[in-house]
Image: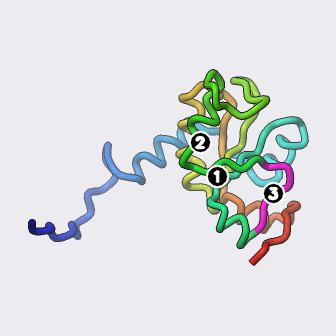
């Protein structure tokens, strides 16, 4: 079997590709700043960290955030599903966090499609939270 050569020309921003998917996802979101996410959590909303364990160990965590690996996220965020997070309901604010705010945008749009009408993500991700000087746990490594 011959492996085809990779495409080198740009196909642009059309109905396909990650840039299109990211832009489409973000159109649905009212993305929040680190300070806004902190206030949402303080007022009873959930912060859900979808970063891999290795990143959480390396960079630290947001105190009080729930951690849900990306591979099971949809099952844990389905407000009507049997594997949903405790306390999850369609009107509860949910802020998804990844490292830099890309994967979390995709996940937050998916969460809205599952019925979490107030799901969004943290613009700039965990790194923006940390740069803002908000509380974090110490990194292990």
Q: Would you call the spot at circle 2 few (<14 residues within 10 Å), some (14-19), or many (20 or more)? A: some
Which portion, as a residue range, is magenta? 60-65
Q: Position of residue 20 (x, y in %)?
A: 40, 48
The N terminus: image quadrant: bottom left
Q: Position of residue 29 (x, y in %)?
A: 61, 38
The secondary structure that most of the magenta stretch takes on is loop
Residue found farthest to the top: 80
Q: Is residue 78 left or right of residue 86?
A: left
Residue 112 is inside the magenta segment: no
Above/below status of 78 relative to 41 = above
Q: Position of residue 109 (x, y in %)?
A: 55, 38
Q: Whole-Å distance between the Cαs marked 2 and 1?
A: 8 Å
Residue 61 is inside the magenta segment: yes
* Residue at x 78% of width, y 54% of height: 34
Residue tagged 2? 73
Check whether the beta carbons of the residues at disc 3 and disc 2 lie within 8 A of each other: no
Nearer to the camera, 123 or 112: 112
Q: Position of residue 138 (x, y in %)?
A: 84, 70
SS under mark 1 = loop
Check whether the beta carbons of the residues at disc 2 and disc 1 lie within 8 A of each other: yes
The quarter holding residue 117 reads top right
Nearer to the camera, 123 or 51: 51
* Residue at x 14% of width, y 67% of height: 4
Q: Whole-Å distance between the Cαs marked 3 and 1?
A: 12 Å
For residue 50, the mark is 1
Could you tell which of marks 3 and 1 lies nearer the N-terminus? 1
Residue tagged 3? 62
């Amino acid at each position: 079997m011959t492996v085809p050569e990779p495409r080198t020309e740009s196909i642009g921003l059309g109905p396909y590709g990650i840039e299109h998917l990211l832009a489409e996802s973000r159109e649905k979101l009212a993305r929040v700043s680190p300070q806004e996410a902190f206030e949402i959590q303080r007022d009873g909303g959930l912060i859900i960290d979808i970063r891999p364990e290795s990143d959480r160990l390396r960079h630290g965590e947001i105190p009080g955030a729930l951690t849900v690996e990306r591979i099971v996220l949809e099952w844990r965020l389905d407000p009507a599903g049997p594997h949903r997070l405790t306390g999850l309901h369609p009107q509860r604010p949910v802020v998804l966090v990844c490292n830099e705010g890309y994967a979390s945008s995709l996940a937050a749009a998916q969460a809205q499609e599952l019925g979490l009408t107030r799901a969004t993500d943290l613009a700039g991700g965990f790194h923006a939270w940390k740069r803002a000087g908000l509380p974090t746990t110490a990194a292990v490594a």
